[in-house]
Image: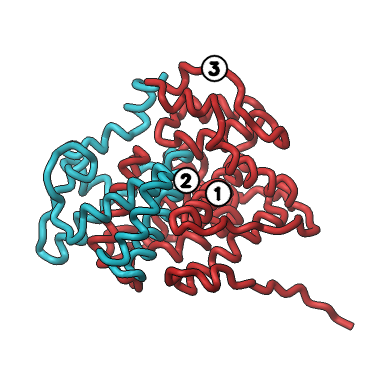
Amino acid sequence: MIRFDVTVTTMVYQDQPLPIRESIALSHSDGIAAFAKAGTWFTAEQRLAILAEARQAHLCTLCGKRKKALSPYSEKGEHDSRGDLPDNIVEVIHRLITDSGRLTHSWFTSVLETGLSGEEYVEIVGAVSTSIILDGFADALGIAPLEPGGPVTGEPDRVTNEDVFDGGAWLPMLNLTQEMTDTGLPTGPNILRSMGLVPSAIQHFFGVMRSHYALADLDFAITRSQTELIAARVSSLNQCFY
Amino acid sequence: MLLRRSGAKKNETYNLNVVTNADEGEVGVPNETFLLRIAEAVYEGNHEALVAIREEGKETLGEQALVDAIAVACGFNGITKVANATGIPLDETTEKDTVQMRKETKIDDYDDSHKSVVYR
């Protein structure tokens, strides 16, 4: 008998008091489930630990001190971590969650010098940034955060994507054939290519992000200008140059 | 900043400097005060503010618009982390077309060349 592996999406956010679009519910179902599966560089157990550590970061004393300091690099010490992941991974997760606006290239370089590979770094960035959307959305709506369930059997394939190029970012970017769109951006803007070393990280993050924003044909009950106002303000608060 | 482009399409000019705190006043977008509150509360994870926003938002925006606005804020709170953590440059046309705007809004201060000097 032939057996097929079938992914069944479980619908989340049912029976919530506020109307959550089906596209968002579906993408969040897939997004949270992906934490319980092996990625390209991390096992399911490690990815679940990354999610748990991202949720822990808000309680970290060192991150609290750094947030208040004129420069986060003036505060030394140890993170209040769950203890499931190496220090260099905890550092990346906590800084992303609590103070991403003051990340610098020299910080990035120092993290890689601890032995973390660029590929591992990218997978962490994709996973943590996805968790920020999922948990932030639940928090903002006053509902319980989604839980990924237990780890699914499987191993990371640890294959580096060779189809990348040096596009001036801290990491190699995804190589894409580009066409200009009427939004003024190419079909593959740099943000989409930024995690090019790990295509599964792109899929994980943008699988969720696409239900929250699109450059065209966004079927939301707020206008394009209202959408872009929110986007611009959040970007500014995050000190995001891009 | 695609807000500028969306305004241009409607022949409207928005005060982008307000968005980056480079200026005071109004941007020129309907319900902007409430929308900016959503952006700030989501960024800060401010539970008290979010409770108030959920209550007021049903009246101010309507339920679906409230959820959609929150969704946009949460999405950008995630995607900015990707951008900040990877140091990506601006897309070519954006870089060419926004030189003056970036200077006026002080967005240039968010570039790594500036942050690397300020945050040592």
Kindly identify the amino acid type of the residue bearing the numbered disc 1: Gly
Q: Quadrant of residue A219?
A: bottom left
Placement of the N terminus of chain A among the 4 image quadrants? bottom right
Q: Which residue is mark 2?
A: B82
In percent of width and height, residue A155 lies at 78, 53
Label 2 close to label 1 by CB (< 8 Å): yes
In percent of width and height, residue A22 lies at 49, 74
Residue A112, visible in the rendered structure:
yes
**In the rendered image, residues at marks 2 and 1 fall on the same chain:** no
Q: Which mark is residue A76?
A: 3
Q: Which residue is mark 1?
A: A126
Label 1 close to label 3 by CB (< 8 Å): no
Q: Which mark is residue A170?
A: none
Report the chain holding disc 2: B
Frontmost of labels 2 and 3 is 3
First-in-chain label (1 vs 3): 3
Q: Seen in the image, is B42 located left or right of residue A98?
A: left
Report the chain holding disc 1: A
Give the alpha-carbon distance from disc 2 to disc 3, as whole Å. 24 Å
Q: Nearer the viewer, residue A60 or A102?
A: A60
Looking at the picture, does residue A129 appear above or below residue A147?
A: above
Give the alpha-carbon distance from disc 1 to disc 3, as whole Å. 26 Å
Kindly identify the amino acid type of the residue bearing the numbered disc 3: Lys
Write down which chain is painted red.
A
Q: Residue at x 56, y 46 (%)?
A: A128
Frontmost of labels 1 and 3 is 3
Identify the colour of chain B in the image.
Answer: cyan
Q: Residue at x 57, y 55 (%)?
A: A145
**In the rendered image, residues at marks 1 and 3 fall on the same chain:** yes
Give the alpha-carbon distance from disc 2 to disc 1, as whole Å. 7 Å
